[in-house]
Amino acid sequence: KVVAVIMVGGPTKGTRFRPLSFNTPKPLIPLAGQPMIHHPISACKKISNLAQIFLIGFYEEREFALYVSSISNELKIPVRYLKEDKPHGSAGALYYFRDRIMEEKPSHVFLLNCDVCCSFPLQSILDAHRSYGGVGTMLVIKVSAEAASQFGELIADPDTKELLHYTEKPETFVSDLINCGVYVFTSDIFKAIEGVYSQIRDTSSNYQSATRSAPAHFVRLDQDILSPLAGKKQLYTYENKDFWEQIKTPAQSLKCSALYLSQSRQTSPHLLASGDGTNKKPMIVGDVYIHPSVKLHPTAKIGPNVSISANVRVGPGVRLISCIILDDVEIKDNAAVINSIIGWKSSIGRWSRVQASGDYNDRLGITILGEAVTVEDEVTVIGSIVLQNKTLNVSVQDDIIL
Ligand code: GDD
């Protein structure tokens, strides 16, 4: 038997996702029509002998209750949310719930960050791990040397794949091979974390504050476990050859939505919309997800990279390109939405335009409307972030509307 643990973090971590994270925990924000966390969960479902999936975080339990019960029913796999009383760090959180995780005596525990987007080749990681031995195997990927410093950088033996050296977000370049935040461990990982806790207990508080910046209950997987275990024939790497992105900002989530849509094109094309503007169906361009409850006018033109959630109404002549439209939004006649995320229950007026600013890239510049924002008729919103419940009756550009 194996189990999977997904680290979902908590409200203090979601600040870069404002205003979308005000009422919805970041892991539940939809990408390609499904909550962010649905993508790793459905990848877990494909592991043979998977007994349970645990989500560990410090959000309130009620925030995950509905999702956890519906996904458990849908996948027919128990999915449980375990709430920490306070953040314990990624390794500390795993250790805190060790008895629950090990209840059914699994041979292996998968550990996944919730905020990464990839095809999660979990079975291949497990198979590789079984051939390497040791405590754990981590998914790694090559990125550009400039990008590498935002991640854990590592050196692996090219032949044995052993993790030889690990540094978390180093200031000077170490390697273009980085940590993807996806791991499989044996139960010995708990001994390694226990070892860190006993070191913390054994050393004087002076030593503790000189060498560790974190509080005593807080143990990070990367700095506190991976770095010291590297080079000891305990940890191994499995290189990801498929797509991988981190999801720290709404702009990155737009890019990840596109990646998941294009994955659907390969694995489950029936989930994607089609139409050529005839037979009362609108023109669909490229990869588009449309929830079955959506009401679309046949003269709208939609795609590529568009995902439209439940109960959205799209009027005549509307143009949607590269955007995420959340539940209950109304987009009125001849409006255009491009490179933007439109929050729940918002309304876009006739002939209005919501789009990214000219220097849009995957970090900056997209427009995000919070929940229940009203953009009145003939208003242009460019590269702006608009907080919930605002009404815009004049055009704005590169602005934050509080
Ligand atoms: N439950 C819980 N409790 N979850 C936590 C906690 C905690 O105290 N702290 C972080 N997490 C969750 C976050 O929600 C996220 O899913 C994951 O653990 C990792 O978050 P961070 O520890 O903030 O690290 P990071 O995302 O900046 O970087 C890590 O992931 C990168 C890959 O995405 C590092 O491991 C990097 O080396 C790695 O490249």
Image (spheres, helix red, strand yellow):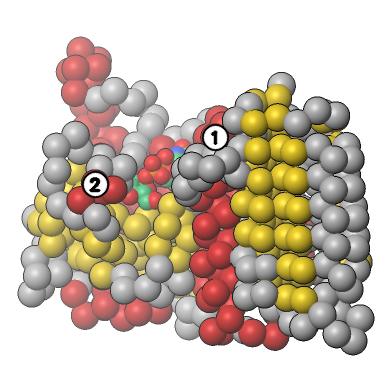
Residue 281 vertical position relative to residue 333 in the rendered view, above or below? below
Query: Where is residue 22 shown, x and y percent of the image?
Result: 70, 34
Label 1: element kind: helix
**What is the spatial separation of the Cα atoms under label 2 and label 1, in whole angstroms?**
22 Å
Q: Nearer the viewer, residue 146 or 361?
A: 361
The label on residue 146 is 2
- Total marks placed: 2
Q: Amino acid at mark 1?
A: Arg
Residue plotted at (62% across, 84% down): 268
Q: Which mark is residue 390?
A: none
Mark linked to residue 16: 1
Q: Tell me if mark 2 has few (under 14), some (14-19) or many (20+) residues whose alpha carbon lies within 10 angstroms of its own.
A: few
Residue nearer the viewer, 253 or 354: 354
Foreground pick, 252 / 50:
252
Sort mark 1 into few (<14), some (14-19) or many (20+) by Cα contacts within 10 Å. few
Residue at left 29%, top 23%? 213
Q: What amino acid does circle 2 point to?
A: Glu
The quadrant of the image that shows the C terminus is top right
Q: Residue at x 34, y 37 (%)?
A: 219
Of the image marks 2 and 1, the number of the one nearer the N terminus? 1
Does residue 293 appear anywhere in the picture? Answer: no
Task: Report x, y in % for residue 269.
Answer: 64, 84
**10 displayed left or right of 135:** right
Q: Where does the image place residue 390, in percent across and percent down from the top left?
A: 82, 28
Element at label 2? helix
Q: Quadrant of residue 135?
A: bottom left
Above or below, 77 relative to 311: below
Is the residue 301 above or below the residue 57 in the image? Answer: below
Residue 280: in sight, yes or no?
A: yes
In the image, 116: left or right of 55? left
- Ligand 1 shown in quarter: top left
| Residue at 70% across, 79% down | 271
